[in-house]
Image (cartoon, helix red, strand yellow):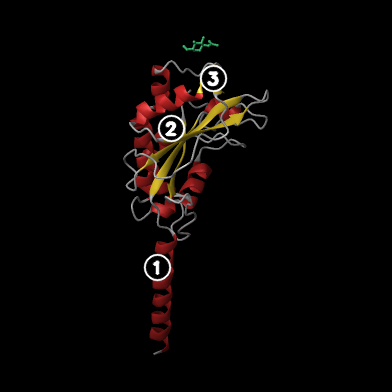
Amino acid sequence: MKYSNFYSVFVKLLILQSLAVVVRCDYDFFYFVQQWPGSYCDTSQGCCYPTTGKPASDFGIHGLWPNNDDGSYPSNCDPNNPFDPSQIQDLLSSLQAEWPSLSCPSSDGTSFWTHEWDKHGTCSESVLDEHDYFAAALALKSQANLLQALENAGINPNGSFYALSDIDNAIEQATGNKNYGYVSCNTDDYGNGQLYQVYICVDHSGQNFINCPTNGVTDQNCPSSVEFPSF
Ligand SMILES: *[C@@H]1O[C@H](CO)[C@@H](O)[C@H](O)[C@H]1NC(C)=O
């Protein structure tokens, strides 16, 4: 019968396609990436506060990114599973507080979360569905409590400069891992390197900090003395 022929070809194509996705989008661990809003904004490009208001003076989540031990990473793994706001309704106020968008023009964060889910989250959807993916990132943020760890080490966001090695030590303490990941710096209008993003390695389940499996990734673009701007 014509219809069943068509149907069986269609099903075979679907199976082939899903196999291809599984192969292409395997991953070994996650980078959990947080950003300091003071450094995001303190550049020549500047920033725009979210429509929901100025975020707290705290690290914000950038993303939870599947990564491979060899340094490569999968992206945009499943166009058939785009970001669906209805699945994260119960997390909305937490996401607005902990995962704010500072890009211009101002937004309520939805476009940021859409990008992160579509590009990165779909690559670990076999382990974390959309709701669990965002919930996992929120849990990791409070688990690390990065700002508190830095402040405990006397590293305050007040525009002073701090030794990169002291920053690394404080993050090691917070995560319990010597090779926790790395920090990246950006540059303000005066050419000062400032603490911008912190990459923390997380296991395949998205729940536990680990010693990073990647070798040779060191702190990026950071001078030995790093500014920690206020926000
Ligand atoms: C910032 O905080 C540090 C640590 O408490 C302190 O030593 C430093 O003097 C402060 N810097 C400014 C500019 O207030």
Quadrant occupied by the N terminus: bottom left
- Residue located beneath label 1 in the image: 19
The residue that mark 3 highlights is 230
Question: Is 89 left or right of 196, judged from the image as shown?
Answer: left
Q: Residue 155 or 179: which is nearer the viewer?
A: 179
Of marks 2 and 3, which one's residue comes earlier in the chain? 2
Q: Is residue 131 above or below residue 44?
A: below
Residue type, numbered disc 1: Leu
Which numbered dot is residue 98? 2
Q: Where is residue 89 in the image (x, y as percent from the top left)?
A: 38, 42
Q: How many labels does the image show?
A: 3
**Residue lying at 68% horizontally and 29% vertically, measured from the top left:** 44
| Label 3, ligand 1: CB separation under 8 Å | no
Secondary structure at numbered mark 2 = helix
Residue nearest the observer in this picture, 188 or 98 = 188
SS for tag 3? loop
In the rendered image, residue 63, in percent from the top left (x then y), is placed at 46, 41
Residue at 63% in and 24% down: 192
Q: Cβ(mark 1) to ligand 1 < 8 Å?
A: no
The type of residue carrying mark 3 is Ser
Crowd band around label 3 with a 10 angstrom C-alpha radius: few (<14), some (14–19), many (20+) = some
Say what amino acid the circle numbered 2 marks.
Answer: Glu
178, 111: nearer the viewer:
178
